[in-house]
Image: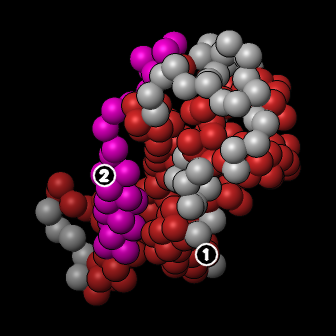
Amino acid sequence: MLTVFIYLMIFVGVTAALYQVYEVNYNINFANDLKLSGAEKAHLDELAQKAEGAKAGGDASAFNQAVARIFGPNLDPHLVLRAFSEEKLSTYAIPLVRRRKRLEKGREASLRHLPRHNIRVLMISLVIVNSMLAQFLGGMSIFTLLYPATSPAFTWLNSPAILMLLTFVLIAASHGISRFDMYRHDLYQIGELMRQTPEGHHLQGQTA
């Protein structure tokens, strides 16, 4: 009965590893805004609404006040307006709102600690490799029933329990990689926004 349970868990693990590849792709392309808390969604909606008035050339004081309240007094409102001027909020606005605590010391202090290189392709590749390894372990759990490994270096492949544990280690690693990727890519996007936005711009209605 224990052996049946172990093989069932291997099957579940392999299925979960395959799902993680889909989940990473979905989160990147379709569900970025779903990773916001209720308060963050409220901030995003408020800033998006007030940015429309500022972009239209009207008095930007309401937008400036919202930026100061949400991000602190040290962040340039022009930078935030640039983020909300993109067609897709997921490009800069969502990362900016999600990581606003990292921006409380202002532009320059934040920019020194933001990554300059985009390693998202590497992170996704690692998740795919982990999924493939999980599939390999699942396949070996069946293969070694008929053809047990005889080499001393590979006799661990004959143990379904070890294969199950390794499968779930890979799942945990992929989950950690996915979380780290979202965090680091947010910081990378914020850094790109800061490097693309000139300093010294003031919005109409902003005090000098």
Label 1 sits on residue: 5
Please report whichever mark, 2 or 1, sits nearer to the chain's N-terminal start.
Answer: 1
Eyeballing the image, is 69 above or below 43? above
Instruction: Answer left or right for 5 relative to 40.
Output: left
**Amino acid at circle 1:** Phe
Q: Residues within 10 Å of mark 2 (few under 14, many from 20)?
A: few
Percent of width and height locating residue 72: 74, 20
Instruction: Answer left or right for 25 relative to 73.
Output: left
Q: What label does residue 122 carry, if any?
A: 2
SS at circle 1:
helix
Instruction: Answer left or right for 37 relative to 139.
Output: right
Q: Is residue 147 visible?
A: yes
| Residue ID at (52%, 67%) | 29
Q: Nearer the viewer, residue 115 or 168?
A: 115
Percent of width and height locating residue 81: 63, 40
Eyeballing the image, is 141 above or below 61? below
* Residue 113 is one of the magenta-drawn residues: yes
Percent of width and height locating residue 17: 48, 69
The magenta-colored residue range is: 108-137
**Amino acid at circle 2:** Leu
Q: Quadrant of the N terminus?
A: bottom right
Q: Nearer the viewer, residue 133 or 111?
A: 111
| Residue ID at (68%, 12%) | 208
* Residue 153 is one of the magenta-drawn residues: no
Q: Nearer the viewer, mark 2 or mark 1?
A: 2
